Image (spheres, rainbow, N blue to C red):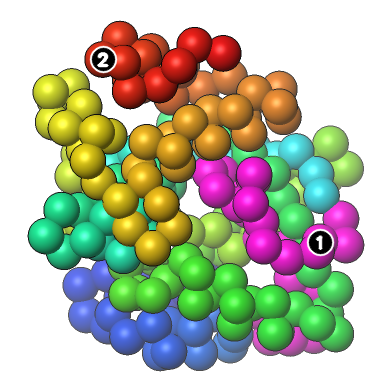
Amino acid sequence: MSLVHASLIVRDPATLLSQARKQWGGECDLWVFGYASLIWRPAFDADERRPATVHGFHRALEMRSRVNRGTPELPGLVFALVRGGSCRGVVYRLARDRADAELESLWAREMPTGVYDARWLPCRTPLGTVHALAFTLDRRSPNYTGPLPDEELVAILRSASGRYGRTLDYLLDTARGLRECGIRDREIERLVTLARRHDLAALE
């Protein structure tokens, strides 16, 4: 199950939120898949939390951020779910009676410019599969960077900062949050090592 694809047509956050609400229906609890900051800063009180794996998408620090972790003049980077591979993360269940308000708050945080494609993805958990809202990115999006050279990554980690702080801190917090969940992401650990090699982050 997925939302109407609108990565190149509709980018109005309110329209996309309306589509998400229609797909959800409001008749059942709402599940949300977290793979980066939603793991270590969910910003909502979940009624249930489970480890989960999504197949068909992987976590990648390949999306320009001009608001949350950067500016239009100096964009930062944030993680997105990009097609291919798999991704281990966390799913949260929000009770139906308060899920709509939580969804609106989540939308304001994750979709201020409507950059993601919100999809309902099957997430495998120890207690069975649930369909959860996940924020993905189409490779055709102008905000998709693809793999960047290490020199460019270092420059972004050194300088980019937005309304929620630096791209560097976002990377380090995500790495820490994943480790605390017992999740090993080799590319994230490589990026952390790269930051340390350039004296951008202290050894832990």
Q: Position of residue 104 (x, y in %)?
A: 59, 82
Sort mark 1 into few (<14), some (14-19) or many (20+) by Cα contacts within 10 Å: some
* Residue 198 marker: 2
For label 1, the residue is: 46
What residue type is disc 2 on?
A: His
* Residue sitting at x 44%, y 58%: 164
Q: Earlier in the sequence, mark 1 or mark 2?
A: 1
Q: Height in image: 32 above or below 7?
A: above
* Residue sitting at x 22%, y 41%: 159
Q: In which quadrant is the C terminus drawn? A: top right
Q: Position of residue 92 (x, y in %)?
A: 75, 56
Q: Is residue 168 visible?
A: yes
* Residue sitting at x 84%, y 36%: 126
Helix, strand or loop status at disc 1: loop
In the rendered structure, which segment of residues is drawn in magenta?
A: 24-48
Q: Are marks 1 and 2 in contact (CB under 8 Å)?
A: no
State the separation of the CA atoms marked 1 and 2: 38 Å
Which quadrant of the view contains residue 170?
top left
* Residue sitting at x 31%, y 16%: 199
